[in-house]
Image: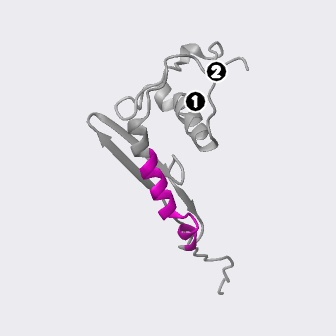
Amino acid sequence: MVRQQRGSDIEQTLTECGAHLRATAVHGEEVQRRSFPSGLDGYYAASGYEGVRENELLTGAETISREATDLLKAKKCPLVKLPIIIDGSHMALQIHESCGHPIELDRVFGTEASMLGTSFLTTDKANQFRFGSEW
């Protein structure tokens, strides 16, 4: 008796293509960096090279190189409280760094200390620590 097997043998290949540019400007001890197309890890999508071409990398390279060198000449920020406006990609990065990493349990428990650091959010603060404004 021969049993017939049913099922599927599926193989799938996903292709992602993208790019990320970073410009670094140095003058003495000061270093300034800018990134394109975002401050995170660039832009990647399930596409072919057309996805890279659509990012206008040459224009982006000119922009971030100019911005990085301009930052070397910029006046220092005043040491006063002022309202700020943060664009979407920088806000995502700020939330990730300020809120995301501190709540990772490997950091809370100190098991990540040798690689990436610990957290100010320790278990003794559970249910009694305010993180952020009342707004």
| Drawn side of residue 133 relative to residue 28, left or right | right
Residue 69 belongs to magenta span? no
Question: Which numbered disc covers residue 49?
Answer: none
Work out whether 97 lies above or below 125.
below
| Drawn side of residue 28 relative to residue 51, left or right | left
Residue 58 belongs to magenta span? yes
Q: Which residues are magenta?
A: 50-67
Question: Which numbered disc covers residue 99?
Answer: 1
Residue labelled with disc 2: 132
Q: Is residue 83 visible?
A: yes
Helix, strand or loop at label 1? It is: helix
| Drawn side of residue 116 relative to residue 94, left or right | left
* Amino acid on which the number 2 mark rests in the picture: Gly
Query: Residue 26's image quarter?
Result: top left
Residue at 65% from the left image edge and 86% from the top image edge: 2
Work out whether 22 lies above or below 28.
below
Q: Residues within 10 Å of mark 2 (few under 14, many from 20)?
A: few
Helix, strand or loop at label 2? It is: loop
